[in-house]
Image: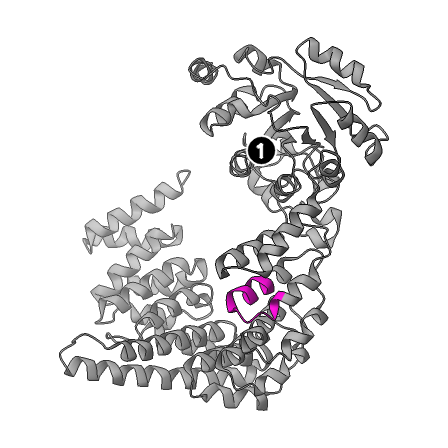
Amino acid sequence: MKHILAVLLSLMAASVAHAADMQPRGVELLCHRTANEDVPENTLESLEQAALLGCDVVEIDLRRTLDRKIVLNHDGALERLTDGIGDTEASYYDDLRLRDAGGWMGDRFEGMEIPLFVDALRLAREKDIRLVLDIKDKGIGPDVLQLLQREGMLQRVRFGGEWADIQQLYPQANENPPVWVQPGVTAEQVKAHHREGKAVIVNFSANDHEMDLAAMKAAVAAGVDGINVDYPRLGADAVGRPVERKLATLAVHANTGESGARTQAILELSRYRGFALENEFAHWLLDADDHVSRAAALSLVIARPRTSPAAFSEALRSENPDARANAAWALGALRAPSDMLLPLLEDRNIQVLQETLVALSHTPGKVNAEMLLPLLSHRDPAVRGAAALALARHQPDIAAKAVPEQLKLEVKAARTMYDDWVQRGKGQLTQSEIDVVMGYYRCQMKELEAISMLHGPAAMRALEEQAFRSGEDFSQMNGVVAAFQMWSRIGRDPRSAVEALGAADPKVADKAEWILVQGGPPVLPAVREALDGQNSAVRERAIRIVAWQGDTDALPSLQRMRQMGKDAELVTWAIDEIEALHPKL
């Protein structure tokens, strides 16, 4: 009751503007169930596509999940629209987020999600479109109204379906509704409705006229105010705003003008689905402007259906190094065969070489170690870091030894530079010195990423060496990254981390403690042994670790310690924490 009262009070303060009334911009285009014939229905991608194709008003379907989230979903049954089973109303939203809501319409759409209503409202506001809300569940009106009010969309919607409770809470809803008619309406009939003050919408959905372009144009000629369609591209043509004209204008902007405007036009074109634009993007990939070339590469990567690797053949052979680099990046993102990239390992351009190596770290196939090992000691640090990634992907056994050795050399060089800077009084670094430091930093981050791709004792030792290395230098971020990577590995052998709890450097001991906290139950036997140790610093940290992990098996030891008066205050806190996590003990 309080929730409904709050909604009523907020609606009393709202303006009395009519929701989703027809706007004076010519014949309007209404889209049924988002762009459902172009992109999987009731997804944000489909809502965006409807807006791109020129729709002024878009219908979406609303249901409420088990945890009372309002989502876009038509059927309720998950079997058709997702890879899951069951009903939307019987599912938690986090469960629905794990479901693929796109693959049912083809693999080109895999990975889409069932979205929240609030996200659809924000997208609609951004794209300046209005909505028709087909409410599928009874009793969710107060929640719907609250979200509309909060997002400033109350005057930009109409309601359908189970909206009786909305009518009670907000009597102004759906005032002055339009008249819906079927194809074949005459100009005289339209005029008669207009004389009564009614807008006229012709329905071209679910009536055997879905693709009847001639009838759509006839309705427009008869003077109707809007047409409701399943195929927005046809509808846009009928109302005199063909999508092809919009694409042609964007293509002109993409071909000429200032760099930023060109890239914006290319990226806008990439949002359209179902248009044969691959050749245009491949052409712009060759452009001398790197920003334009990169935007084209990105467009080819996100295109649906997926771009054929063959589309990059010309760019890989281009005299323009930016085109080669961007093509290499795109092929990596598309997981193209490694063989396509191998010729670029001979490229003399640093950017091309770096992008090629990073791409190879994602691509299937097998690359010989002889092609990658020399690049691990390349003069350019960016190339060295990227080579580590490619080696870890294609030759993990060799990388397990070679990459940690190279990382040691990088750290040694960075430490030498740091020591020299300290001896000079830590004065301001020159830009060239900053560039060198950043080069080492970027390289080491990629080498650590490569080590994290590996498994086995050698990779673990390399991570431990970086995580538990004390002192400050230009490589100290290595320890932070390495420590995070150890969270899921430390349970196999936590002895090094337990030992590091007693490190003289508090930063090292802090990292070791948090590694063991995040390491989960596998580390606890070793930590419990430390509870009885003689090193007070290690013992105190061990007490905190078993507390944060809620380790009930540590309670006997802790209770014994409290009876003995050993670390009594800390032990009492730890016992309270553990018992709070397990209230039924």
Above or below for 435 versus 70: below
Residue drawn at x 76%, y 24% as measured from the top left: 202
Across and down, in percent, residue 265 comes to 57, 54
Residues in magenta? 284-298
Above or below for 40 versus 25: below
Give the left or right position of residue 136, taking residue 582 as reference.
right
Residue drawn at x 55%, y 72% as measured from the top left: 288
Residue drawn at x 63%, y 73% as measured from the top left: 363
Q: Which amino acid type is marked by label 1? A: Ile
Based on the displayed image, in which of its 4 quarters is residue 187 positioned?
Answer: top right
Give the left or right position of residue 504, taking residue 386 as reference.
left
- In front of the other: 510 or 358: 358
Q: The residue tagged with tag 1: helix, strand or loop?
A: loop
- In front of the other: 196 or 488: 196
Across and down, in percent, residue 86 comes to 70, 37
Residue drawn at x 36%, y 83% as measured from the top left: 410
User: In the displayed image of the protein, which residue is found farthest to the top?
Assistant: 196
Majority SS type along the magenta span: helix
Question: Does the magenta portion include 257?
Answer: no
Q: Is residue 188 visible?
A: yes
Dot 1: few (<14), some (14–19), or many (≥20) neighbours within 10 Å?
many
The residue that mark 1 highlights is 129
Give the left or right position of residue 197, taking residue 457 as reference.
right
- In front of the other: 195 or 104: 195
Above or below for 108 versus 57: below
Across and down, in percent, residue 448 comes to 43, 74
Q: Is residue 212 visible?
A: no
User: In the displayed image of the protein, which residue is found farthest to the left?
Assistant: 425
Question: Does the magenta portion include 291?
Answer: yes
Across and down, in percent, residue 432 comes to 29, 80
Above or below for 262 versus 467: above
Based on the displayed image, in which of its 4 quarters is residue 477 positioned?
Answer: bottom left
